[in-house]
Amino acid sequence: MTDPGAGPTAGTPADVLRTVAGSGVTVYSSEDVGERNATYEVALYAPGFLLVGDDGGGRGFLVRTDDPDSAVFSSGLGDLEPADFEIVSASFPEWLASLGTAH
């Protein structure tokens, strides 16, 4: 597993291969992230964002694709309008840590 704090490319969404037990949040594996983004048509409804996980209850978590230090945003998966996104963490590594996954 990748250490989220190891460097500028470590801990990026595509590097994370885990489901967070106990938090109710799934962080998509590199094998699943493309399929999840296609299923929810993220490129169509939220261009420039990548869906990196969900809470199992219809809420998704996204990051900006053009910013390696992107905040993590949340949104209902039925409303992927970036203007409605809420910031849930200042960065992807901080978000992972808040879920209890940082080492």
Image: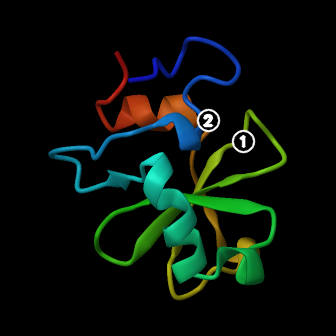
Of the image marks 2 and 1, the number of the one nearer the N terminus? 1
**Element at label 1:** loop
Is the C-beta separation of discs 2 and 1 under 8 Å? Answer: yes
Q: Residue 98: x and y, percent? A: 38, 34
Q: Which residue is mark 2?
A: 91
The residue shown at (42%, 71%) is 59
User: 88 or 39, which is in the foreground?
Assistant: 39
Tell whether 59 sits left or right of 26.
Answer: right
Q: Is residue 100 above or below residue 58?
A: above
Looking at the rendered structure, which numbered label has been put on residue 101?
Answer: none
Instruction: Determine the residue located farthest toward the left in the rendered image.
Output: 22
Q: Dot 2: within a 10 Å radius of its alpha carbon, few (fewer than 14), some, or many (20 or more) residues? A: some
Element assignment for label 2:
loop
Q: At label 2, which amino acid type do we have? A: Ser
Q: Residue furthest front?
A: 31
Find residue 47 and report its image quarter: bottom right
